Image (cartoon, rainbow, N blue to C red):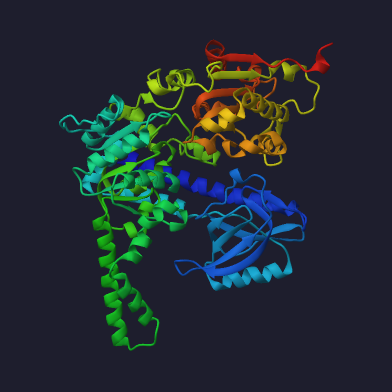
């Protein structure tokens, strides 16, 4: 027990360190605003300056809202403002950025404005008074709710004396062996063997089961079938994920199968498809809600104490009844991991918890949901992007190591690897399979040999080594931007040129008739911004703009495109590759491509690392490795 206490004490410390880093990062960014002069314009992914206050209104929940207007940002795909996130206003005084009081929640975001919910009327008056005396700016704030929930959940996990939960906790910590039951063989003719095996083991597990889904292997499909099969044996299950987008995605798949889903959480952060299933919408649609609304209206009026007490008692009865009815009607309750700790979920308990995208979830967040279940089934891929952790001390302390990752190491017998992928040409798949999945992946017959053109190869590396080495141009290698990211202007131009050549080779009519789509992916945000600007300058791409997406590796997790170009950016003699050493990031990048993968990068720099050396060798054998010729001005040297 002492070791268990120490384990959870340490996790709480790491969560506190992460919150501290978030707060200090916010203060640093606010201090940087002091270098701005009044009248300048800042359009960054997490900041707008100046902004203009607009109209006020009331939303569907009766909350007052405020419009905030600003200049259009030229890089909307990297925008960090999202519905549900919190923001703070600031103003510039004497060359310093001064934070204004009050946190505001974002309701809607467009390229020129956002709508905020106001915490109270005094917040609006405060903003209006400051606006009258100088310019206002807005930037993402720090909401400590998530951190508070994680700390409180860890404390509850540590001190729980519930026998069934303690058993589950000890299995997940490696203190007790997992167990399973034997059931008759389940049959799903529409699924492959590895998917069927994963469902069988998920249903049979008494404490924990993991569905390990590499790129394109149908992890969500398998998880949905496992949920439906579990509902043959249980009245209700809890389905969670670390993000609202992931919760909405799996909830939508369940709804399409006719499952009654109750979506719990902030409606501002749900997809439009899920709003009708939200707790708030279903609450308002309940037959008894009209009476409840009438009671609340009467309670706002001047009435006798005796009458008020009767109404309050009836109000409580109706609230409990509506809440009970909504949960009793639902077969699946879905929410984020943090959302499972909301007051709406108090006293709720489930036989089985399903966690989708578990490899991207912080361990403390997982425990918040696990508290409500007797067993847990996790789906994800720990060989793709991990959760975001900003504090270096928290990372070194293990906060970025997920619970799924730990259970995979502790109990490999609980892991079911999905082995058939339905996305990539087999030559694109092969390297990832060998490096990350012990060569166990195979391409489904319908995608194994799929190509954009029979005259093309599925893999190309355009090597800039010789060009960079012999070029006298000032922008031929990596450079750090003001925000700390990296760019490589010469490589960015080469990516644009390569994309244009490839499009001309395929032909625009073929692209349009076959609806071929493209992605340009880079590990660095600065490079993504640069490529977007260059792309917009070229009239040639205007007709195909909707078919071309540019972004960082992180923004492409879970997505796929027919043709993917990767700009690796790093170009130096030392072989320094920074966070390209996180190979999971590259696994995501190269496995986004369905039919064609083009890598643009300095093979000399990158091949100091054995992963990139092996990747270059793989492309030499299974595709085209093309050294970029040296620049003309160097030809006589």
> Residue 45: where, in percent of width, then height?
62, 47
Q: Is the residue 284 above or below the residue 210 in the image?
A: below
Residue 58 in view (yes/no): yes
Residue 67, quarter of the rendered image: bottom right
Quadrant containing the C terminus in the rendered view: top right
Q: Residue at x 20, y 33 (%)?
A: 180
Q: Residue visible at 40% across and 27% down?
A: 422
Q: Which of 559 and 543 lies nearest the eye of the viewer? A: 543
* Relative image position of residue 378 (x, y in whole percent): 34, 37
Q: Is residue 485 visible?
A: no
Quadrant that contains the N terminus = top left
Left or right position of 394 against 500: left
The residue located at (53%, 32%) in the rendering is: 513
Image-based side of 553 in relation to 73, left or right: left
336 horizontally vs 41: left or right: left
- Residue 634 at x, y = what percent? 81, 15
Q: Nearer the viewer, residue 301 or 423?
A: 423
Q: Is residue 514 above or below residue 332?
A: above
Q: Quadrant of residue 205?
A: top left
Residue beneath the point at 59% across and 14% down = 624
User: x, y (%) of residue 186?
Assistant: 20, 31
Q: How many labels sit on residues?
A: 0
């Amino acid at each position: 027990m002492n070791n268990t206490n120490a384990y959870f004490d340490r996790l709480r410390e790491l969560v506190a360190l992460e919150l501290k880093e978030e707060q200090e990062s916010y203060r640093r960014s606010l201090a940087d605003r002091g270098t701005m002069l009044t009248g300048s314009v800042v359009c960054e992914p997490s900041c707008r300056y100046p902004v203009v206050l607009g109209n006020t209104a009331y939303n569907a929940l009766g909350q007052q809202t405020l419009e905030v207007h600003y200049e259009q940002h030229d890089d909307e795909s990297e925008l960090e403002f999202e519905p549900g996130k919190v923001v703070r206003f600031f103003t510039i005084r004497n060359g310093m950025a001064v934070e204004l009081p009050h946190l505001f929640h974002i309701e809607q975001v467009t390229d020129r404005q956002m709508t905020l919910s106001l915490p109270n009327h005094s917040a609006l008056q405060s903003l209006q008074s400051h606006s009258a005396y100088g310019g206002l700016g807005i930037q993402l704030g720090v909401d400590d709710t998530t951190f508070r929930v994680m700390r409180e959940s860890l404390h509850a996990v540590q001190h729980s004396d519930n026998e069934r939960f303690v058993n589950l906790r000890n299995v997940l910590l490696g203190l007790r062996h997992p167990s399973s039951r034997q059931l008759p063989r389940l049959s799903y003719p529409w699924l492959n063997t590895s998917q069927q095996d994963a469902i069988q083991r998920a249903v049979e597990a008494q404490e924990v089961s993991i569905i390990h889904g590499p790129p394109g292997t149908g992890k969500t499909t398998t998880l949905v079938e496992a949920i439906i099969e579990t509902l043959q044996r249980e009245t209700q299950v809890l389905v969670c994920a670390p993000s609202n987008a992931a919760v909405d995605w799996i909830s939508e798949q369940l709804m399409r199968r006719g499952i009654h889903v109750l979506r719990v959480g902030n409606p501002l952060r749900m997809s439009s498809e899920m709003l009708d299933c939200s707790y708030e919408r279903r609450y308002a649609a309940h037959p008894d809600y009209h009476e409840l609304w009438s009671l609340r209206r009467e309670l706002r009026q001047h009435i006798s104490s005796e009458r008020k007490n009767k109404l309050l008692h009836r109000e409580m009865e109706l609230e409990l009844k509506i809440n009970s009815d909504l949960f009793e009607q639902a077969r699946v309750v879905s929410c984020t991991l943090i959302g499972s700790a909301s007051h709406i979920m108090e006293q709720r308990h489930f036989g089985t918890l399903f966690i989708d995208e578990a490899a991207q979830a912080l361990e403390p967040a997982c425990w918040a949901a696990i508290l409500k279940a007797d067993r847990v089934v996790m789906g994800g891929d720990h060989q793709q992007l991990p959760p975001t952790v900003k504090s270096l001390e928290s990372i070194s302390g293990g906060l970025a190591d997920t619970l799924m990752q730990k259970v995979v190491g502790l109990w490999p017998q609980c892991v079911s690897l999905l082995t058939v992928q339905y996305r990539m040409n087999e030559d694109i798949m092969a390297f990832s399979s060998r490096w990350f999945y012990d060569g166990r992946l195979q391409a489904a017959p319908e995608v194994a040999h799929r190509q954009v053109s029979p005259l093309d190869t599925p893999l190309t590396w355009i090597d800039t080594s010789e060009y960079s080495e012999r070029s006298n141009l000032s922008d031929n290698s990596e450079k750090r931007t003001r925000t700390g990211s990296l760019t490589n202007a010469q490589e960015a131009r080469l990516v644009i040129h390569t994309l244009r050549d490839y499009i001309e080779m395929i032909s625009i009519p073929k692209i349009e008739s076959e609806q071929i789509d493209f992605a340009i992916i880079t590990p660095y945000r600065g490079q993504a911004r640069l490529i977007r600007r260059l792309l917009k300058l070229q009239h040639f791409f205007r007709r195909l703009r909707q078919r071309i997406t540019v972004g960082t590796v992180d923004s492409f997790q879970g997505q796929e495109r027919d043709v993917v170009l990767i700009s690796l950016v790093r170009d130096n003699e030392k072989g320094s590759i920074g966070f390209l050493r996180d190979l999971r990031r590259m696994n995501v990048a190269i496995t986004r491509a369905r039919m064609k993968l083009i890598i643009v990068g300095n093979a000399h720099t990158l091949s100091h690392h054995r992963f990139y050396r092996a990747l270059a060798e793989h492309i030499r054998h299974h595709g085209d490795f093309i050294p970029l010729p040296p620049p003309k001005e160097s030809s006589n040297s």
